[in-house]
Amino acid sequence: MEQGHALLALILISVGTAAVLVVVPSERKDWVRVLSVLSGATLFAISAYVFVEYRGDSEEQFSFLLRYDWLENVGILGEDGITLHLGVDGIAAVMILLNGVVTFAGTLISWKIEYKNKDFFVLFFLLTAGVFGTFSSLDLFFFFFFYELAVLPMYLLIAVWGSSTRFPTFVRTKEYSGLKLMVMLVAASVLIFLGIFATFIEADLGTFNLPDLYAHAQQGGFDTDFQKVVFPLFAIGAGCLAGLWPFHTWSPDGHVAAPTAVSMLHAGVLMKLGAFGILRLGIQLLPEGAEFWMPVLIGMAAINVLYGAVSAMGQTDFKYVIGYSSVSHMGYVLMGLATLDPVGVNGAALQMFSHGVMTALMFAMVGAVYDQAHTRELAVFGGLASKMPRFAIYFLIAGVTSVGLPGFSGFVAEFNVFVGTFRSYPVIGGLAVLGAGITAVYIFRLLALSFFGQFNEERWGGLKEMNKFETAGGALLIAFILFMGLWPAPFVDRISPTVVNFLPGVGS
Amino acid sequence: MREGLNLDYALLIPEYMLGGLALLVVAVDMLMPNVRKQLLPVITGLGLIGAFVVSLAYLDETDNFAGLIAIDDYTTFFRCFFIATAFAVVIASMGFVERELRHPGEYYALLSVSTAGAIFMASARELLTAYIGLELLSFSLYVLVSYAKRDARSNEAGMKYMLLGAFASALLLYGISFIYGTSGSTTYSEIQEAFESGTSGFTLGTLLGLTLIVAGLGFKVAAVPFHMWTPDAYEGAPLPITAYLSATSKAAGFALLLRLFSSALMPVIDDWQFMVAAVSALTMVVGNVVALQQHNIKRLLAYSSIGQVGYMLMGITTISPEVSSALLLHMTGYVITTLAGFIAIIAYHNETGAEEIDDFRGMSDRAPLLAAVTAVALFSLAGMPLFAGFLTKFILFQSVAQNDYYWLAAVAVVASLISLYYYLQVIRRLYVSEPPEMTRFRVPLITQGAVVVLTAGIFFVGLYPAPLFDVTDSVAAVLFQS
């Protein structure tokens, strides 16, 4: 049993759970729930194992390696044409842990789903399989395979189990939001597809194996003009999933309309998949193209931060505030990556984890109150802390993490991003800090309006505290927020060697 | 007549079996009227299985019949392909035959005979033999399309198909005559030799011939701008025949195109490559964009299949061993997926009369297995992973991009994105909308079996394609050995 089998297990258990659930009768809702939570727990355990056992190395970028031949020496494919090649580096290991945590929390939060919960969990586990696969994929074909797999269930998840939002003059239906999300993400993947064609042809190695392509890039196999043309394809294609402005418009509508666990996974983990794509396909594969385009990217990331924050300030719906907040915080990730500076990229990877758990927590909490109140309008809430104190504390923690209060993970991540940005782009660094200030405004406004102040007893008298599953899921996420916030060393020890030694253009 | 013509009649046994099966079925229909409806599908099915098994006996054979018909791995591949497709259509037709037909013998006989026609299109190594095979398939289809006698649309569809088909056949024959004029032969290998020694004296003739052949065959496979018969034929025909049109008719056209263009017309590739590329691009775009407007499921599937033809024409544009192998892989995946989707839709239609996309509302509540199969088939056609469509499109598009037609592959990827939209509209009806009534109904066991097997096929090609890809690779290699 090699270590690499853990990565394969993550994918197979996810897909296997989906396959088993297909044959479970729809009426047996409790079997579905128990099986899903057990699977979630197993996936969490294995991802924790991968995280703990990973050792940063200065010689080899990837460990936990596993490779199976899939298609070779046939058609256009040469030796090792397409192989199921799995492996993780420091950043991927942290991301795998993130997915394990959010998936487990998601299964707990989804315990109360009644309508067709079997179908829900089949699609949910396909989604999580796609994410695990993309983070561990070292073959370009399978990277794209799992990337698309993660998009496949989205329309149905949102359109069947999601919720529409009623605005004063129109209704933003869940069908619209789901369609927009899926079509925009597949459109973005068209760009990635085109980049993959070009890269495979230009490399002329007959293989999709990423380490071979990286070595080819290191030896100057892709000429600079090629890189300058193809990098935007990958950057925009993956950036769209990461919420890069102006390709982010699927995100607020999509995340708001999605059911709680799906919002948690999508905003929490899938957007990081986009940033990860920029890393694997952009920075590592086309380093000179990356160097050329990063000044543009960092400008766009700054716009992300500010635009997202200002938009969040203007929202009247609870979940839309969080949706735009995600766009804003992903701006920090993209900013950190765009600095091509070791501290900045470290910060980006830390922010990927920190924002992941934080936004998952926020969406979980919003879901908890929406399921009872059936509205998300900020104006109607007030003084909730008196009725749902535990809920208020959880949300408060999520809020201060978002603002970047020391002691919580947000501070560790954002601090690194700011330092990295200031080193190369002081003006952008200033704008980023301004963004943090605006974040404080809308977060504290949100907290003040909903949790404190006058409590509307006649309308909300019947509100109960969160159920035990929501509490457990929330507690799991808070544990990791505090983990990174108080003791970031395990994370940095895994991320830093990868960033410093193996990302071209970054580091020494 | 040349001496030494190989008249080994034993090479064509599968075709004799198909012909004999047709006669047998008609005879049983006439002589045993009481048991015909139960017995005939069984006889046809068994006959097809027999022909399939006998076809496999010709593996690794390289021979030809009278210089007209090649018996090689390519022929064997397509024999198995078309016979298996006919078998699936027989299963798909059971409901239609049960309800609508009083004399099903002719129906099954036509299916059998058209399969033989399709096989001749794939195996012919001479233009007029290919033409005869094409006409055999077409005439059978003209009748089959009009088979729903009491539905005016079916009659209209058959009429349109026949008139336009006759016109296209005339164009094709005219083109063949030009090629004969400029090359001095109608046999693929001799045409290839003639063109290899140069066509400088008669480029206009060659060019005219090529254009007319592309037009004639373009009609057959429903390429734009020769596609106008397709939506009407698909809408009017009985659903099982729509499935048959979508699968065999297209595959046979491509089998012919591949063999012709890879041997006889290969030396003049510079004359036709851009023309075929333009037709391919036009087909992909028009097929998918017009599909966005459709609200009848059969017309939607018609335009969707036109779009798919566009992708396959890319394979003809950049014809080479790797691309041909990718094309054959894509065609196999496409036919499996199409049949799975159609059988599911046919089963639902038989129970509920669903024709418009809106009639499929809530299918997941009334027939969950059928809805799941339809969703899987549509996602596969859109090119989503886990399913055959993702892999086959990826390999085909990459192969085309590799052969200097990057722009065409880019058009294909965008067209594929467009198709996702209208497939999602159908899937939305299946899963998101409420059904008009909530009663579940029993799907016949044989239909369940068929859809499960075909869906397993979709997953098999999508997740473990190596065996199939090795087969298509070796089959494609046969085409280029000269």
Image (cartoon, rainbow, N blue to C red):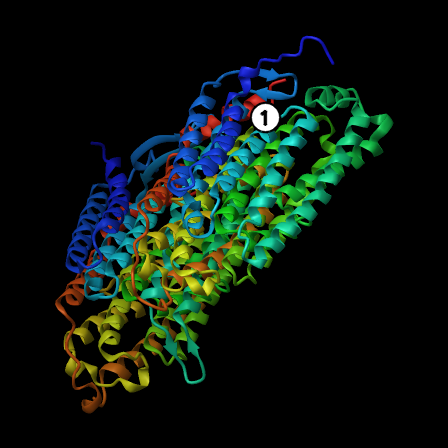
Counting other residues with Cα less than 10 Å from the Cα at mark 1, is it few (<14), some (14-19), or many (20 or more)? Answer: many
Q: Quadrant of residue B388?
A: top left
- In the image, what residue occupies the spot 36% across and 67% down? B435
- In the image, what residue occupies the spot 30% across and 57% down? B441
Q: Is residue B344 left or right of residue A187?
A: left
Asked if B121 appears above or below B198 in the picture, the reply is below
- Can residue A139 be seen here? The reply is no
The picture places residue B209, in percent across and down from the top left corner, at 77, 34
The picture places residue A477, in percent across and down from the top left corner, at 21, 61
* Quadrant of the image containing the N terminus of chain A: top left
Q: How many marks?
A: 1
Q: Determine whether the residue tagged by mark 1 lies in a helix, strand or loop.
A: helix
What is the three-letter code of the residue carrying label 1? Answer: Ser
Q: Which chain is home to disc 1?
A: B
Asked if A452 appears above or below B372 in the picture, the reply is below
Front residue of B98/B464: it is B98
| Residue assigned mark 1 | B123
